[in-house]
Amino acid sequence: MMVGMVSEEATTAATRTTRPTAAPGPAPGADGPRRSGTHAWRARLLVLGIVLAALNLRPAITSLGALLEEVRTGLGMSGSVAGVLTSVPPLCFAVFGVMAPRLARRFGPGAVVCAGMAAITAGLLIRPYAGSTPAFLAASALALMGIAVSNVLMPVIVKRWFPDRVGSMTGLYSMALALGTSAAAAVTVPVTDALGGNWQTGLAVWAALAAAAVLPWLPFVRDRRAASDQGPAREQGHAREGAPALRITRSRTAWALAVFFGLQATGAYITMGWMAQIFRDAGVPAGTAGVLLAVTMVMGVPLAFVIPRVATRLPHQGPIALALGVCGLIGYAGLYFAPAAGAWAWALLLGISNCAFPLALTMVGMRARTGAGVAQLSAFAQSTGYLISIPGPLLVGVLYQHSGGWGLPIALMAALMVPQMVVGVLAGRDRTVEDEAARQP
């Protein structure tokens, strides 16, 4: 599937770069295949880089969740500090994600993603052996910084290199991200046991995957434009990108997309942090509750590829946001009324609902015309969205502790799904942030 997409893109690129000349000769004839061949090679390498980068954007979080009890014991970490630790990822995504567009303009998006993968590698390698809670948090923040800038720039790279394949490439990237998320949650404990039961080794092993992701990006480190060899149309696009930065906060679509991103992230972090406990408190065995959570997360693997492809074929993505929201409402209603009896159905429905994430990424690529616009919109939507998502998991824990049950927390989760559906419809309208920002006084 991946090779097919690249081959098709490479064929299109070859058609663009091969032009007739007035006096055909051996030199032009030889140059055309070399240029098209070089572009095809770079495109394939870039697809590999995108997939490997996506695989590394969540294991730093979910591998820690799988071994959190062992980490707390090993570092003497209090329960309150461990609670704060679960809120560090969205905070880092919000703070460091804002830096990504400026870094990309100065060094090129390929160089920034390459540095991001190196930061993830270093952070994952250092933090298990940090020896203290502050040092552990600092090393985690280093890895999360690399994740944050890569999060923001992935839609930018897809838009620049694969403008005619935004849906399929976003789907491939989202599918790899979901696969990395679920794989780290599922295999971290077995891998730790196989390596002798040492939690430090079990966390550090994920640095190897991050190190592998650095390699495909090395050829793009010196490529400031990331798409400068793709013909006059791209060069005109880059000329537009050299214009002053648009005032993204003037766009209603940008705000709608930011709120949509934040609410779907809230639901995802609540699900990852609390859903297994909801099932366990309902009488589901601990092992089965873990499998149910894994099922919810694995649902994102196939759907993350399908949803972006469907979204790019529709003039309005609001109906998809509504359909995902309805699945979430039914899933939460099931958790409220019959959490154990219909556990598998609720896990499947909530897994479908959590696929609002690839939809949000796809809309980021569709709601701006230029690479610079996508960079600004991606940074704004993700940074603002992750800030919005920070209180959610903490509030669920507070409500659970003070009410003594899951009724109020589940009601809160269902209530948040309603505004998510509303802003999803607003963000899905066929318009661009550049046009909206220009119209505002």
Image (tube, rainbow, N blue to C red):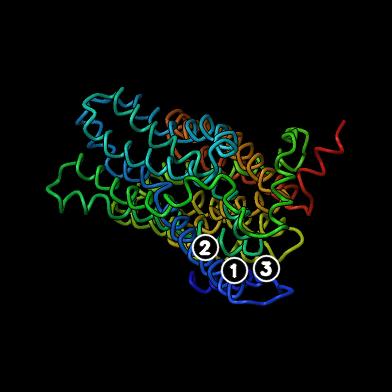
- At mark 2, the secondary structure is helix
Identify the residue position indicated by label 1 in the image.
Answer: 9
Q: Residues within 10 Å of mark 2 (few under 14, many from 20)?
A: many
- At mark 3, the secondary structure is helix
Residue 164 horizontal/vertical position (percent):
66, 64
Q: Residues within 10 Å of mark 3 (few under 14, many from 20)?
A: some
Q: Upstream in the sequence, badge 1 or badge 2?
A: 1
Identify the residue position indicated by label 2 in the image.
Answer: 43
Mark 3–mark 2 distance (CA, rounded to whole Å): 15 Å
From the viewer's perspective, tell me whether residue 89 is left or right of residue 369: left
- At mark 1, the secondary structure is helix
Identify the residue position indicated by label 3 in the image.
Answer: 16
Contact? badges 3 and 2 (CB < 8 Å): no
In this rendering, is residue 68 above or below 315? above
Contact? badges 1 and 2 (CB < 8 Å): yes
Q: Residues within 10 Å of mark 1 (few under 14, many from 20)?
A: many
**Residue depicted at 66% across the width and 72% down the height:** 15
Q: Image quadrant of residue 377? A: top right
In this rendering, is residue 357 above or below 269? below
